[in-house]
Amino acid sequence: MKSSVRLEKRRQELVEELDQLVYVRRGSVVEQRVKATDAQGHSYERGPYPIYSFKERGKTVSRRLHDQQQVQRYRQQIHDGRRFQEVVAELLRVGEALSDVAMETDTVKKTPHTKSRRTKRSSVG
């Protein structure tokens, strides 16, 4: 039972942590640099421009971020999104372990019945 109590406690901790992860986001923030050419034909690099990139329906979607505060918010939300995925994965493992403990407990409780031996009664006649 110690194992079951410990698992239940961990499960509750994970659920509470999930409750705190409100603003979550998938993807990443990267810096984009653009090569350009001036009027004399000299090439130069513009940027860096912060870009938020993520997958949606199998396609990559990118959005340009406009200020450093926005970049920091997106990075924090992405970090929290990754933590959300880790917590959910651990919650699944804990749930499976709890299920295993419950199955073991059921197996112990459901021991096969032994057939009672009937004693022969002598017929009175």
Image (cartoon, rainbow, N blue to C red):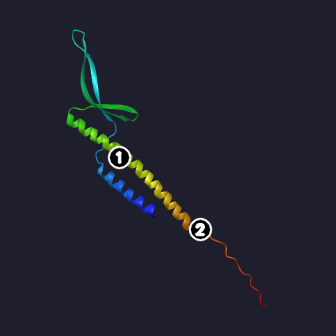
Q: Name the kind of residue labelled 2 in the image.
A: Thr
Q: Nearer the viewer, residue 64 or 80?
A: 80
Residue shown at 21% from the left, 34% from the top: 68
The disc label shown at residue 111, or none: 2
Look at mark 1 in the image and give the residue it sits on.
84
Residue 19 to residue 71: above or below: below
| Residue 81 on image: x %, y % | 33, 43
The disc label shown at residue 72, or none: none
Of the numbered discs 1 and 2, the one sitting upstream in the chain is: 1
Residue shown at 24% from the left, 32% from the top: 65
| Residue 23 on image: x %, y % | 28, 45
Q: Please, what secondary structure does the residue beneath circle 2 have?
A: loop
Residue 30 to residue 36: above or below: below
Q: Please, what secondary structure does the residue beneath circle 1 have?
A: helix
Q: Nearer the viewer, residue 71 or 57?
A: 71
Q: Which residue sits furthest front? A: 2
Residue shown at 31% from the left, 31% from the top: 62
Q: Which residue sits furthest bottom? A: 125
